[in-house]
């Protein structure tokens, strides 16, 4: 089992395809909870989706905030963050040329950049990056549960205080959810906390969601009972995914989120017909690995803002 690591530490390493077949990320878990058919389209069918301006803006803002901390503390200013927008956008377009076609004209493109710049400005009203030294940024984390399911994902930022407390930080370019959707938003963070806890036996002290769309911060302090319950939920979710694989029953679930789905033309809820299921080898429970302890990389203490971690 691989230890958690910063993204890109081992670019030459080939992925363990067998492990990926028995692994779950917060995004794919959210897909299945939102709509099993959406999970199928993304994970089983690997259907392409057109670039989304909102998703691309989120990727751009995340990239800028990650690289902002490459600068010495004094250089982490709103002006410098704005200067990073252009180079990071150019990199994204080089890696994914279709992104350049998202805009109808230069005016639309300029408005999109202004929105991204506004989110970066808002970030500086919520945190003072000159007082922070993140231990990890865009950190890849993996852990194996006793059930044989591998958890994997990327944490935007991991802060470790001098006293050893861990804070998991996630940037969101949307707005803070209503109380009704709060538990759904926290599920992703509890997923990461569970992975770290099962990897190293250390319970994160704080889960922090920074909403750059409206300038709010959601903080939550998990306990062991929270994470045990999260583990039960994830294992039950994985069993449901496996049942869908075995039966081929990937039922659509209509909700408000359908408005943003790019697969409506092949969704039964909208009068469409899904493509035939591709052939895939069935998962073999006998090949599941036993629980394995892994280690988070050695922490580099950060200066945390008082009373926030």
Image (cartoon, rainbow, N blue to C red):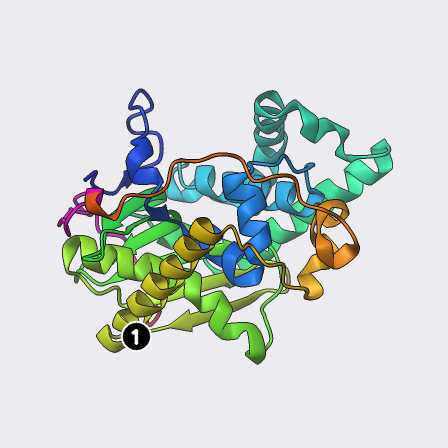
Q: In this view, does 232 lie above or below 3?
A: below
Q: Position of residue 164 (x, y in %)?
A: 17, 60
Q: Against 233, is 245 above or below?
A: above
Dominant secondary-structure state across the stretch colored magenta = loop
Q: Name the residue under label 1.
A: 226
Q: Position of residue 120 (x, y in %)?
A: 59, 49
Q: In which quarter of the image is the C terminus?
A: bottom left
Q: How many labels does the image show?
A: 1
Secondary element under disc 1, as helix, strand or loop, is: helix
**What residue lies at 18% left-to-right and 57% top-to-bottom?**
146
Q: Can residue 309 be spotted in the picture?
A: no
Q: Local crowd at mark 1 within 10 Å, few (<14), some, or many (≥20)? A: few
* Residue 165 % position (x, y): 22, 63
Decide which of 68, 265 is in the foreground and name it: 265
Residue 64 relative to residue 208: left or right? right
**Does the stretch in magenta take in 197?**
no
- x and y percentages locating residue 114 in the rendered image: 73, 45
Is 74 or 35 nearer to us in this picture? 35
> Does residue 241 appear to the left or right of 160 in the view shown?
right
Q: Quadrant of the N terminus?
A: top left
Q: Can residue 189 be seen in this view?
A: yes
268 to 90, vertically: above or below = below
The residue segment tinted magenta is 287-304
Task: Please tell me which residue is depicted at 59% across the width and 27% down the height of the picture.
Answer: 87
């Amino acid at each position: 089992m691989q230890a958690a690591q910063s993204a890109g530490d081992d670019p030459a390493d080939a992925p363990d395809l067998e492990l990926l077949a028995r692994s779950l990320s917060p995004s794919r878990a959210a897909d299945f909870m939102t709509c099993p058919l959406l999970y199928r389209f993304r994970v089983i069918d690997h259907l392409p989706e057109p670039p989304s301006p909102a998703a691309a803006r989120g990727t751009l803002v995340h990239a800028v905030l990650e690289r902002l901390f490459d600068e010495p503390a004094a250089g982490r200013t709103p002006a410098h963050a704005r200067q990073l927008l252009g180079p990071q956008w150019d990199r994204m377009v080089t890696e994914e040329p279709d992104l350049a076609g998202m805009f109808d004209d230069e005016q639309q493109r300029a408005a999109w950049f202004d929105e991204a710049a506004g989110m970066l400005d808002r970030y500086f009203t919520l945190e003072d990056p000159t007082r922070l030294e993140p231990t990890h940024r865009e950190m890849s984390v993996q852990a194996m549960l006793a059930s044989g399911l591998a958890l994997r994902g990327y944490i935007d930022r991991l802060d470790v205080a001098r006293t050893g407390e861990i804070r998991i930080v996630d940037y969101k370019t949307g707005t803070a959810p209503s109380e009704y959707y709060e538990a759904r938003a926290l599920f992703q963070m509890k997923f990461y906390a569970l992975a770290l806890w099962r990897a190293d036996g250390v319970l994160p002290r704080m889960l922090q969601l920074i909403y750059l769309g409206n300038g709010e911060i959601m903080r939550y302090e998990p306990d062991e009972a929270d994470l045990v319950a999260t583990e039960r939920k994830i294992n039950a979710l994985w069993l449901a995914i496996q049942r869908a694989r075995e039966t081929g029953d990937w039922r659509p679930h209509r909700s408000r989120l359908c408005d943003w789905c790019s697969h409506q033309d092949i969704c039964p809820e909208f009068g469409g017909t899904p493509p035939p299921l591709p052939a895939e080898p069935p998962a073999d429970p006998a090949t599941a690995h036993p629980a394995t302890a892994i280690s988070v990389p050695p922490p580099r203490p950060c200066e945390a803002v008082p009373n926030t971690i």
